[in-house]
Amino acid sequence: MTIPPAVTAARALVADLVSRGVADVVLAPGSRSAPLAYAVAEAADAGRLTLHVRIDERAAGFLALGLSKGAEGAPVAVVTTSGTAVANLHPAVLEASHTGLPLILLTADRPHELRGTGASQTTDQVGIFGSAVRFAVDVPAPSQGAAGEPGTEPGVPTAEDLRDLRSVTARAVSAALGFRSGHPGPVHLNLAFRDPLTPSAPLPGLPADTAQEGYPKPDPPLVVPAMLQHVASPALPGNPAHTVVVAGDGAGTDARQLAEVQGWPLFAEPSSGATGGPNSIAAYRALLGSEDLAGSIEQVVVLGRPTLSRPVQRLLGRPDVTVSVVAPGAGPWPDAARNAAVVLPGVSPAWFETSTPPPSAFLERWRAAGARASEVLDDVTSDEAVLGGPTALSVARAVAAVLGPDDLLVVGSSNPVRDLELVLGLDGPGPAVLANRGLAGIDGTVSTAVGVALAAARRGLRTRALLGDLTFLHDVGGLLRGPDETPVDLEIVVVNDDGGSIFATLEHGALAATGNAANATFERVFGTPHGSNLAQLCAGYGVDHQLVKDVPTLRHALQAPSHGIQVIEVRVPRADRQAESIELTRRIVAAVQE
């Protein structure tokens, strides 16, 4: 099987860095940086460099700085994924710049066609470190050679691409060491990578991730002027009866109201502000795995910024689906698939000036499918189903079930928000949900939750947080508060599976299942087990900690009065996360097809 261009380019880059004296690489886990992760792990296994893995990019940057300082100015490379991960390097970059230490910053990025489209974890990384770096270049994603092209094979980066990459590396290392300027310091290579990102893709049993690449139409979308929302709105093309509303982060109540007025199914992310109601479809991302059901959709209206679900992104990229995006303001509209037919600055009042139609056969079919999905989810998260110990999904359900519409829930990125997406609404309306989905990073979430709790208390609202263990550890310093600071009441539920289970649900988890060596690499550079004692960490910050061992105890703890910051830890298994996710989707699709 041909090695993907991203992986081949990453291997060439790492080999060239080693040949130029780089002996240490510090890596923080991520998905877009996967080609680099595999390449440095491979080089480390071969004894060509020493790999250091850290969960927190801030810690990774300063570890690299210390390695360079201890080695009397040797160049050290740092690898991060895209988005907020890159920004977290900035403090260490500034220190390295002022002390003249040669850090080589290798930051992964989306390819150029996805920038400015609202693609998840994508921001402008070019020039992010400003004058703090001695050299910076935005390296385009490697292209694929065509059949018969001299010096390459189909699917392999062209010889010209690899030559350009080596040239850039030479300039970067030279600038980092100050060979020409006498002024060493950090340098920045922003490296774009296209899917696939793993050594062998597409992987058996998992479709290639075409969600980001999409199926762009040849015609550019029609961008409707702002004034139009006040006078008229173009009629939605196609068959309005076969339309769904996708409510991404920050969509607001307009999304739910539009779906109900028009009689359309609603696919609402937890932080959309549009969850609930008769048209909200449970487990919609799993239901999209039914070809027959998903194939009935002809039109999608998008509000907010959808980032959680690959099946939704694949839906938005289908060439046979007409996509209308509602995107107020001057920022880029969310259209990662580059498939939008119409972009509107707001929902026209005319869309609401109609009486709610009787449920169509299309809507009833989706409602029935959602009801069957809810039955499956109820079965797998019931107290009887988790007698052997809680699962991440049952913990998310317990949190959502205890909290009501007058509560606020701050949910972390990665698996917690996706688990919540499946179970929110099973036991009633649930809480209002807030999340950092702008770049979908895990950093700063504890501090975010503290700020939300302080502001919400002024309105008489109670705040909880649902976080993964890595998200908690990434910002455990957010627990630190001085004695003169305003008191805050906040319960933080930490789902502790000792590592990054989100990667097990992606293609990296499937690759890990192919053998012991692949699994060992996965565990080190993606799974990142930590073995931390959260009780002792909390004690160090003067924060109450409670370890609960079953779901009923968790519900009781959440219902009890609380004061100050309290951490409720629930330990769940990680080893079977991918298999459980696949089996849950299979059961939901099978239930719909019965």
Image: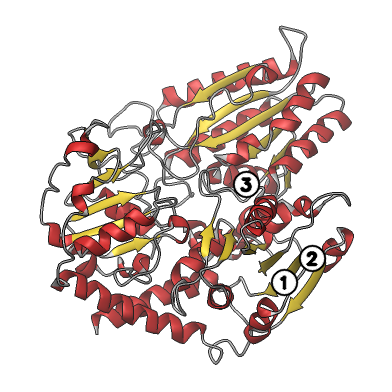
- Observer-side mark, 2 or 3, equals 2
Number of residues whose C-alpha sits closer than 10 Å to that of mark 1, classed few (under 14), some (14–19) or many (20 or more): many
Q: Which residue is labeled 2 in the image?
A: 534
Taking the spot 36% from the left edge, 33% from the top edge, the residue there is 113
**Residue at image point 76% right, 54% down:** 476
Query: What is the C-alpha distance between the residues marked 1 and 3?
Result: 35 Å
> Can residue 50 be spotted in the picture?
no
Q: Which of marks 2 and 1 is nearer the N terminus?
A: 2
Instruction: Name the front one of labels 1 and 3.
Output: 1
- Mark 2 or mark 3: which comes first in sequence? 3
Location of residue 110 in the rendering, given as x and y in whole percent from the top left corner: 46, 37
Check disc 2 and give the amino acid type.
Leu
User: How far separated are the C-alphas under marks 2 and 3?
Assistant: 32 Å
Tell me the tag on residue 42. 3
Compare residues 487 and 72 and report the one nearer the observer.
Answer: 487
Q: Mark 3 is on which residue type? A: Glu
Picture residue at 24% right of the left edge, 38% below the top: 229
- Marks 2/1 in contact by CB < 8 Å: the verdict is yes
